[in-house]
Amino acid sequence: MIHMDNVSKAYSTGNPAVNEINLHIEKGEFVFIIGSSGAGKTTLFKLILKELEPSSGTITVAGQELNSMKRKQIPKFRRNIGVVFQDFRLLKDRSIYENIAFAQRVVETSSRRIRREVPQALSAVGLAERYRAYPSELSGGEQQRVALARALVNKPQLIMADEPTGNLDAQNAWEIMKMLEEINEQGTTVLVVTHNREIVDAMKKRVITLEDGRIVSDEKEGGYEHEA
Amino acid sequence: MKLNSLLYSFRQGLKNIHRNKFYSLASVATMIVCIFMFGVFSAVVVNVNHVVREAEKGVAVVAYFDEGITDEQIAKIGDTIRARDEVESATYVSPEEAWEEFAPIYFGTEDPELTEDLIQDFAADNPLANSASYEIYLKDVSKQDELVKALSEVEGIRRVDSNEVVADTLTNFNKLVGYLSIGIIVLLFAVAVFLISNTVAVGIAVRREEIGIMKLIGATDVFIRAPFVIEGMILGLVGSGIPLVLVLLLYKRLEAFIESQFGMLAGVISFVPAGRVFSYLVPVSLCIGVGIGFIGSMLTIRKHLKV
């Protein structure tokens, strides 16, 4: 699903944020990426989304070579990826229903499909009843579930979550993780960038640790305890 | 872009306007002033042109023939003159007609009977026997010099009289009004483009987060930009529609007023009918309005919306 070969990304000042990374994630995997802040997690995330161009090396995501991809092809490419953020990034002036429908409108889905699939996506995250509510009326955990529903509604091959539990209490964090696991079990590749030690240790998934822009460990059933 | 998405973009464009009421109002107001001025200037220019054109019809070039020329040659010269592009019409004036017209001035008398007698007395010995001529009227007075030069070279023409001062004045006045209005209008349009682009910039700033999400979800450039372009075009359309109605009302009012108050000027100043002015002013103004909206929003989008 994701193949990075000798990928480096240097900004004009300082050390490269990502340094000679080789990373291979297969279809259907569930992968955590951990590391202290400044380790290069966000840069890696942006490289995969083609928000940034690598300084060197090649990146292939969902079978598409990003280096040679033309600007015009980027939107179509991104439709393969569902993205979830720490701060939810919901549109505050629209209802929950509209927030999810928005993701479909953007990719020009027909109204009929929107009417059918938005309730499905809301049920999947357990918020079917609350479709008329606005983000400000929901708890953090609920908002993140809406964000997850939005990421899922276009049925992406890959879900990428950047600190999805960063703003949530332990119980809500677990709920979100369980949902991501379920999504993964249905065949979607999941990539989670996180600081949450407890969750990473408990989930027993593949863990890639970044430090100073390099991969320092890549464990099949890893956790923080494996750190040197 | 699908119809569905177009409708969505349209709704979002309207929403942008609604959210930025203050800026939208400011740019529509500027557009109204611009198009209003444009409409007024256009109407003035059309009417001044019309009056000048009417006045031009009275400015003639007179070509006199060589002595002893035959009627046949005169007819031939007439054909040559009429064949020229700048000539509106050419009338042959015989020596008798010339004398009839000139005699009252020459004898300086107001008594028609006395004049008639004098003309009769001189008829056999017409002092203007050699003054047969063509009175030539031009389509465009500014072409007078050219015509005079060309006519001087035609065989059989002895002399060409023209009134350069009148022709020059009319031509210059026409040009002055034209340049002045173009200058002011261009300036105003620049202001309108600036304001609309600012309004759209505010809209983009307000929607930064939404645009960011759209990009990550996989919205195409067109989809992201469309609401803003539509916003600009709606502002332009509204900003040009309103002043058109105002100018039309004003025009009709003024026309009626001048007619009722200055009836005796009817022969000198005649208004171009509103229908004729507005048949081109409406499409031109609407195109300009929508065009300014389009250009204004495009400029901003290119600057602030690197998708």
Image: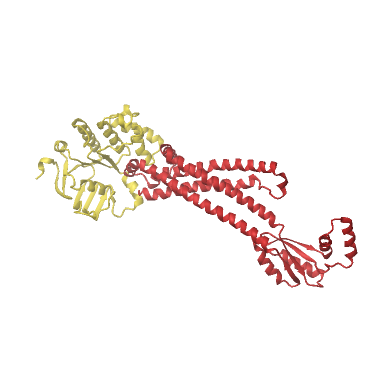
Chain colours: A yellow, B red
B193 vs A57, left or right, is right
Please provide percent x and percent y for residue B278: 61, 45
Name which residue lies at 36% across and 37% down. A102
Residue B11 visible in the shown view: no
Count all numbered tags in the image, as a single digit.
0
- Choose top left, top right, bottom left or bottom right for residue B14: top left
Please provide percent x and percent y for residue B103: 83, 62
A91 vs B173, left or right, is left
Image: A131 above or below B253 = above
The foreground one among A98 and B259 is B259
Name which residue lies at 66% across and 66% down. B145
Please provide percent x and percent y for residue A79: 32, 44
- Choose top left, top right, bottom left or bottom right for residue B245: top right
The foreground one among A188 and B91 is B91
The foreground one among A135 and B60 is B60
A123 vs B27, left or right, is left
A6 vs B6, left or right, is left
Residue A67 visible in the shown view: yes
Name which residue lies at 83% across and 60% down. B108
Name which residue lies at 35% across and 28% down. A132
Instruction: For the C terminus of chain A, give its image quadrant.
Output: top left
Please provide percent x and percent y for residue B187: 49, 52
The foreground one among B185 and A55 is B185
Q: Residue furthest top?
A: A129
